Amino acid sequence: MAEPRIDVQVETPDAAPKDEKQHPNTCPACHSHYRNDELEAALWVCAQCGHHFPMRARSRIASLADDGSFAEEAAELRSDDPLDFFDLRPYGERLAEAEVNTGLGEAIVIGRAAVDGAPCELAVMDFAFMGGSMGSAVGEKFARACESAAEHGLPLISVSASGGARMQEGILALMQLPKTIVAVADLHDAGSPYVSVLAHPTTGGVLASFASLGDVLVAEPGALMSFAGPRVVQQTTREKLPDDFGRAEANLRFGHVDAIVPRPELKPYLARLLRLFANGK
Amino acid sequence: MASDAELRLRERLSKLKSINLLGGARLSGELERLQKQLDRITAEPTEDDIWRSVELARHQDRPYTLDYVERLFDDWVELHGDRGRGDDAAIISGLGRFQGRTVVVVGHQKGRDVKERAKRNFGMAYPEGYRKAMRVMKLADRFRFPLLTLVDTPGAYPGVAAEQHGQGGAIAASQATMLRLGIPIVSVVIGEGGSGGAIAIAVGDRVLMSENAIYSVISPEGCAAILWRDASEAKKAAAAFKPDAAHCLELGVIDGIVPEPPGGAHTDHDEAARLLGGAVQEALDELEALPVDELTRRRRARFRALGVFA
């Protein structure tokens, strides 16, 4: 028998676990169905039951940043393929496809913004781009967000949504953990606060690095935030998993996050925090 | 007339030279061994070579952390417990004398027999293990003792209790702790450098790898199960993500390769320990010459620079 393995990093590299037959705009909790524009207007929250649908990076930024305040940074940065990685398909092809499908250059968007008038730096991940996995480019962009925040004396807000490290970049993907942690350390040394918002899912290498190192950790309702995904835990340990295994609610109970904030309340919540950290300045 | 293979080899050689090849492995004038190592590094490892590393890294007779500690340290005192929840036997920590100075050791520990494997949880730590590691690292920092971390884990333990106790946060905090230590840190991947569970204690000023160790973001089996949808394609997966020491050196992830006895570290624990001790001694000598500010600045710069993007 193979010894138990860990391999938690990218349990869901390309897609959230989902019922293949179900339309993405159908609520998995109560089966209400919505048009895109209805969901967009409702911040991708089910009007019937409050289920939080995945939210794309651009929508997220629009929901947090004051109108016209977002100035994107490092938009031109792209992943490379240092290992010439080839599984069933070349990595380069997967990247190109992800860019075409999402309209994004990578799984994270960074830039300066204002939240209810308070200037800050935003770093927002997008699960639709290769499962929000973190390779060299994602790590670099996050680090640059920290550096931009430090340079301008601004707080950093990140919104994570990631299956973990990007396998196709091998050991360099793992090295993005300490790289992003260096960036947070430098940010803190510069005196800037960091608020980490964990959206569904934040797992593996992203949870085991910057997403856990915010001065304040905020989770979205129902977000999975576990180092190892439920399937890996189930297969390795044969344990019966609790219904809320790894979910935001369990993490709040065990003391791993400061708050669970429903999406419609997130912007005012963050604005309040930013005012408090600014301490009247 | 140079063949394609020769050209490729020369190109690799010049690339390797430019990244301070053998940084941590300049050992007691063993030129012949170094030359062999150089030859091995400059030849493109085949799928079989890489798989051989995977097998040797997991060999049941491979020396583990305590096998090295026993051979390299005098006056060893093991420290137990995270002062909160428990003592995780998958990570050992303690103080000992290494070449005349007190050094703090933190390392994963696998078990040799069935009973010990269960006790050590196959070297897969809970958050308690990483919290114990952090406590002992801070102790080292307080007294300015250098830190040696030995990495040998399939990964951090993926269990319900481990998650409830905050596995992800503990791994992140341990790395953040290491970045702030004002002491020299040498990290050696001696066997399996499995993912987050490995990097949690591998944020060193010098990161070395034993010749047949592996260091990877995911196990070959896990990668195969996800990307090939078939765990039995592990060999192919390993060849694709290249967890062997030569590739890690080439990518700048490690600073040097620690040679092993011919046939692998499991054939001769004493010789394996002697070679590791030499590499650690050399790295510590270099690091102890640096002022603390410079040490921590360089450590941050080293990890900040990792990655390849366009």
Image: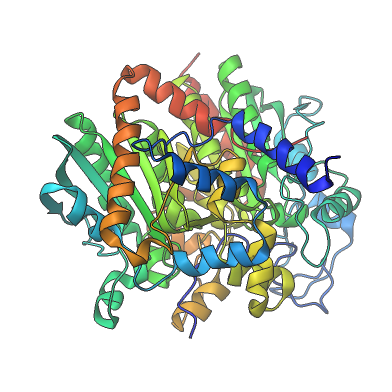
Left of B251 or right of it: where is A27?
Answer: right
Of residues A250 and A186, the one nearer the viewer is A186
Q: x and y percent of residue B131 in the render?
A: 29, 51
- Image position, residue B277 (x, y; %): 28, 44
Q: Nearer the viewer, residue A281 or B69?
A: B69
Q: Where B302 falls versus B114 (above or below)? A: above
Residue A274, can we see it?
yes
In this view of the protein, can residue A52 be seen by the observer? no
Q: Residue at x 52, y 80 (%)?
A: A235
Q: Residue at x 25, y 81 (%)?
A: B115
Q: Name the residue located 63 percent from the left edge and 72 percent from the top edge.
A: B234
For the point 42% across and 62% down, which residue is it? B264
When asked about the image quadrant of residue B207, the answer is top left
Q: Residue furthest front?
A: B1
| Residue B288, image x, y percentages | 29, 24
Pick whichever, A53 or A206, lies toward us.
Answer: A206
| Circle count | 0
The percent position of residue A33, horizontal first and vertical second, equals: 83, 70
Q: Is residue B74 left or right of residue A30?
A: left
The colour scheme applied to this rendered structure is rainbow
Q: Residue furthest left?
A: B75
Residue in the foreground of this view, choosing between A275 and A1: A1
